[in-house]
Image (cartoon, grey):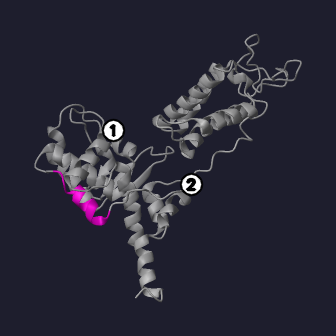
Amino acid sequence: KTRHSAVAGFSSRRVNDLTPNPPPCHRNQQGRVLAPKSKRLLRLWREQLEVRYAPRSVTQYLMHVETFRTWLEARGLDLAEVETRDLLAYQSALYAHRKADGKAYSAGYQANRIAALKNLFRFLTRRGYLLHDPSAEVDLPRVDKRLPRVILTAREARKIVEAPDTSTPFGMRDRAILETLYATGIRVSELGNLTPYDVDTEDRVLRVLLGKGRKDRNVPLTRAAAAAIEAYLVFGRPKLPGSKRFLFLQDKGGQMHRATVSRLVGHWAKQAGVKKRVTPHTFRHSVATHLLKGRADIRHIQALLGHASLGTTQRYTQVEVSDLKRVLQRSHPRGR
């Protein structure tokens, strides 16, 4: 059976001018719209991604599409020839793919890769470079909305936050970072992008610029977090080496990266005697849980964490085992 290209004008023999929506006259005898080569359309897609998404998300999307292109090339196919059946075959290949230990990859692993392809083909369709979207009939794997594996108790969080020695510049920095994570639930990428101009310790407000989804938000600080940041800015940060552009600096200066913050949090958790595997995101989960237990409104928590959907925040409203134990003790005939 002859394969018909879903992409207009991807044939290496016929390349036309780049136009977002080619006019009806730019059609061949089969009625297919003529368009530029695939690499030029991928460049357009990348430029669109860079406007809408954070750099890390752009990198991941490009990587996922490049993996798909490699898979196509191994089968003698070009991106121009992609049909729904090819995407379904690729989805099956992702499902069958195994880790080094033989275990299957998660549904989230598969969903992220298919989502990148759907984003690409949807973009090309809307711009008029596709006659139809081959990914429209491909469903994303269902990803279970599971509760976070690790939640700190209020006592554990306090022990970690208070672990650094604040008599040193680096200790002041680490204390300020931990206080900020626990006060705001800020994402580690957002924390790394903070500058001194984004914090107001007098009004106790943190400005998160271009957070996830390219959205800005103001986040309140606790008194403890504001005091720790103020001490760091006055007595600690001026003594750290290197560029001073960002609020929190690496040991040798410059922007604080994700891996560095993760090591820092893990180190102080161990120093505090907390046996759990603690990451920066653990503080984010813990903040939401502690605020809910303190009867905070879920929409306020959504605004604090910068969740686009209330459904993302609602996973923290699951009834905890400790609450169920109290209900069982109070209400069950043999619970007393």
Quadrant location of the C terminus in the rendered image: bottom left
Q: Residue at point 73% right, 33% down? A: 125
* Mark carried by residue 78: none
Q: Residue furthest right?
A: 29
Q: Residues within 10 Å of mark 1 (few under 14, many from 20)?
A: few
Can residue 185 be seen here?
no
- Magenta segment's dominant SS is helix
> Is the residue 254 above or below the residue 179 in the image?
above
Give the magenta-colored segment's residue range: 153-164
Q: Nearer the viewer, residue 298 or 112?
A: 112
Quadrant location of the N terminus in the rendered image: top right
Where is residue 158 shown, x and y percent of the image?
24, 61
Q: Residue at point 45% right, 64% down? A: 300
Give yes or no for contact between labels 2 and 1 (Cβ–Cβ under 8 Å): no
Give the residue type at disc 1.
Ala
Say which element carries label 2.
loop
- Give residue 301's quadrant in the image: bottom left
Where is residue 204 shown, x and y percent of the image?
30, 58
Q: Residue furthest left?
A: 167
Q: Is residue 275 left or right of residue 207?
A: left
Quickly name the residue at label 2. 144
Quickly name the residue at label 1. 259
Q: Residue at point 26% right, 65% down? A: 155
N-terminal of the pair, mark 2 or mark 1, is 2
Where is residue 112 shown, x and y percent of the image?
56, 40
Q: How many marks?
A: 2
Say which element carries label 1.
helix
